[in-house]
Image (cartoon, grey):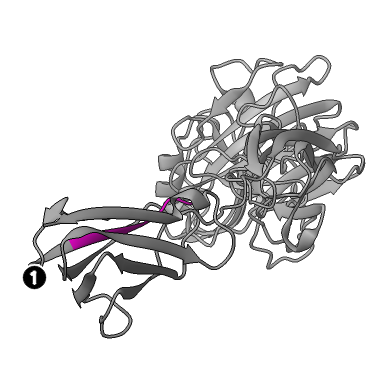
Amino acid sequence: MPSLRSGAVLVLTAVLAATVLTAGPALAAPGAVSVSDADLRPCASPTSVPLCSVTSGGGTAAVVDGATAQSGDGYLRLSTPGAGDKAYIREVPGLPLGRLGDLAYSTFVEKAVEGRPNLAPSFNLEVTSSKTSPKDGLPMGFTSLAWEPIYQPATVTPGTWQTWTPSTQKGWWASKDVTATGTENRFGFTTYTATFADVVAALGADATVYYVEINQGSGAGGLQSGVDLFRYGGKTYDFENPATASAITASAGNNQSAAAGQPFPTALAATVTGRSRPVPGTPVVFRVTAGSASFPGGSPTASATTGATGVATAPTLTAGPTPGPVTITATAGSGAATEAVVSTTFSATVTAPPPAAVTDLAVAVSAPPTGRPGNSFVATVRVTNKGGAPVAKASTVVTLTGGLLVVSAPDAVKPAVGTSVTILDGPLAPGATAVHRVTVVGTRAGTAGLQTVTSAAGPDATPADNTATASVRLG
């Protein structure tokens, strides 16, 4: 494969390689494909399709981070210290010449070539056309099409990002026949003054494109430049390395409390960031470093991994048996040279458990104050659960005195006869009241009465209200 003319910024080589671009946690421009330094592997195969790099001599191509980045935090750095050094990237587009669409890229000259500050990486296409040359009548065949910023009206300005659009700006030339400016070459377009539309019309829209390249080659010794937002065929490559953990903050669950033995209401969550953006896929270890609390299984530690927003959420934290302050530390980062260990703390409080609920039943009985012997009347019995815990079963005994006899008691545990009735209630929820009606009849004149006693299993908080009486004057 022939090289470009002497002094050109770009030189071609036939050494290629395969690589696979991966979607890492890098912040690419909207709609762009993120390419990290790990993605950009050396080209080694002539059938390589994904983006790869070619270097020779002391040339290097690497995705680096820097405050001068145009988009995000990274860019592609091409460096050619020596006059014969080469560094460029290329990709097999899988598209004919007429379907490459918008062509664009941005450059940033970090170190200019002494005496030639207008040199910058150029846009290259390696193409074969089956058309006949209008100049010599032979098949056009292979050529390297090049577009260079040096031939543009706008001056290359070192230390400034500049965006170039080879699909709309003039300046194309072709290897194998570099004619004088403005004169037609054997491929049918004018050197240095043709637009991309002129090139497509000359070689044919169906011309085969072997490679699309951003090149920095021989003749550019001492040039170090940045490249970003490389676009063709409807896609844009944004050169960005994955962010690594540089900071972690407590984002949920800080400064909360729970009673001893109870779960804390809000799960602990920590947000990991790097270069001011979320870092997904990072393990975070939550550790109880002081106080009484634990994660599932009684463990003092738990692990979680950050999601797309950089947030890692711990499993449920449960208050231990001892009231007091609790400190939990969340740690992220490997501690490797490229990733620091970062941590943040959460504060929590274990409060004393509430008093144990106790049984507290109360009974009340009411009846008309007067009556006549032989006439029946209704007495009402109320059993209330005043405690904080449900009562499974309560037993209430109603005893009649002064000649009163039971006529009916629908809620009695057995047919109501004589002078005694037993009523069972349950379960009774806290605050609930059960109401029962007992029909009685007086058999003689005088003072009669009803005595009620209620009880449940276990001690009662206020036994004084477990009994109640009502009196009736019969006459």
Mark 1 neighbour density, 10 Å: few (under 14) some (14–19) many (20 or more): some
Membership of 381 in magenta stretch? yes
Q: Amino acid at mark 1?
A: Gly
Measuring from the top left, give residue 344's x and y in whole percent: 77, 33
Please give left or right for residue 51 compared with residue 87 in the image. left
Membership of 209 in magenta stretch? no
Would residue 289 be seen by someone viewing this image from the given angle? Answer: yes
Q: Secondary structure at mark 1?
A: loop
Q: Is 297 located above or below residue 61 in the figure?
A: below
- Which secondary structure dominates the residues rendered in magenta? strand
In the image, the segment drawn in magenta is 379-387
Q: Which quadrant is home to the C terminus?
A: bottom left
Measuring from the top left, give residue 451's x and y in whole percent: 35, 61
Q: Which residue is mark 1?
A: 374
Q: Which quadrant is home to the N terminus?
A: bottom right
Would residue 247 be seen by someone viewing this image from the given angle? Answer: no
Q: Nearer the viewer, residue 115 or 191?
A: 115
Residue at 41% across, 62% down: 453
Measuring from the top left, give residue 204's x and y in whole percent: 42, 55
Q: Nearer the viewer, residue 254 or 230?
A: 254
**How many labels were placed on the picture?**
1
